[in-house]
Image (tube, helix red, strand yellow):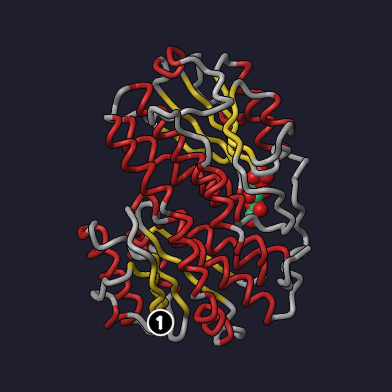
Amino acid sequence: EKDGHDWFMRKEIHEQPRAVADSLLGRRTPEGRLHLDEMRLSDQELRDVDKVIIIACGTSFYAGMVAKYAIEHWTRVPVEVELASEFRYRDPILDYSTLVVAISQSGETADTLQAIRHARTQRSKVLAICNTNGSTIPRESDAVIYTHAGPEIGVASTKGFLTQLVACYLLALYLAQVKGTRYGDEIDEVMRQLEAMPDHIATVLASADAIYAMAAEHVDTRSVLFLGRHAGYPVALEGALKLKELAYIHAEGFAAGELKHGPIALVESGLPVLCVVPPAGRDQLRDKMVSGIQEVRARGARTICLVEDGDDAITPYADTVIRLPKVPVLLQPLVAVVPLQLFACELATRMGHDVDQPRNLAKSVTVE
Ligand code: F6R
């Protein structure tokens, strides 16, 4: 049942090219327009949307952070991303023109469910992004985008996360199509880039051994920092969460630009710092990231850099380089998170932990 893998999680990491491909399947009409099966909100209702609020927990929340960048970039509609557990307690501003997007792999997370119930009392439309057919959150929503990851058994979310990202990109592009904020050929181009992602993810998986070797060098590590910018920032947060959950070591993700505002005080000799470097096409972002890497390295950090293939500007400042396929910055999380999943899975395995059932965690959190 684990297909020769030691853990469901490792199997599920390796299923990601297929899960992403399946989540993209059947989303276009023969004329090439985007079509979402259970959208159930009319074009007019979507045109009336003037604000999007994304609510989710944990890993799903990080998918929501990426979604914010994509939706705002392609549609110019303002997006807020909020932890479901905070949402209804702060008296959020909602009305009929607010689209609330609930992201939940399980569809049963109590915090998220209570948040959408609150949103519906305020007459907002709720769209669920969910991996579990017929679960409570999609049943209580006005519309659904189902992800097609297949059952996720490992408690830590992996393929669930990648397919949530796909659904978020699809939603962003669909809104752009309906609202007319992007031309059809632009949407087409992004769809083609998305359809190329399963192969790119497979390329990253093919170099798993190099990441495992790196994990082997870190079994005595007690603390790891993760840095990212733009869409790489949520990837850094997700990499840190995976390490906490599975290896039980202190890990924190930061927006690289925040380093100098405090976190750099944590850096000491030998501290591993994992850096998600933006693609070279985004030079301003990339160059700022490079200077962040230089700063932590000058203070003795061991830098592990996830870098686009062919970008050598970082090499002098990287103790370890992990190559990523060339992809657009907004889509980079789909490839950049994979080495971080492999790293956490391998490190936890070497430390003797139960990767599929980490201590104190449950797959569905059905209490608030
Ligand atoms: C992390 C993880 C959790 C979930 C969170 C939300 O690996 O699995 O952080 O992402 O509990 O769960 P769903 O998406 O089912 O609402």
Q: Position of residue 102 (x, y in %)?
A: 58, 34
Q: Left of 186 or right of it: where is 360?
A: right
| Residue nearest the observer in this picture, 26 or 169 | 26
The answer to which quarter of the image holds residue 184 is: top left
For the point 53% across and 41% down, the residue is: 25
Mark 1 lies on a secondary structure that is: strand
Three-letter amino acid code at disc 1?
Thr
| Residue nearest the observer in this picture, 322 or 38 | 38
Vertical placement of 205 versus 147: above or below?
Answer: below
Q: Position of residue 346 (x, y in %)?
A: 62, 76
Q: Position of residue 232 (x, y in %)?
A: 40, 57
| Residue nearest the observer in this picture, 262 or 142 | 142
- Is residue 101 visible to us here? yes
Vertical placement of 96 versus 299: above or below?
Answer: above
For the point 72% across and 49% down, the residue is: 151
Q: Is mark 1 within 8 Å of ligand 1?
A: no
Q: Quadrant of the N terminus?
A: bottom right
For the point 61% across and 59% down, the residue is: 15
Q: Residues within 10 Å of mark 1 (few under 14, many from 20)?
A: some
Vertical placement of 8 versus 317: above or below?
Answer: above
Q: Position of residue 159 (x, y in %)?
A: 60, 54
Q: How many numbered dots are placed on residues in this image? A: 1
- Is residue 86 visible to us here? no
Q: Quadrant of the C terminus?
A: top right
The answer to which quarter of the image holds residue 104 is: top right
| Residue topped by disc 1 | 320
Q: Residue furthest front?
A: 30
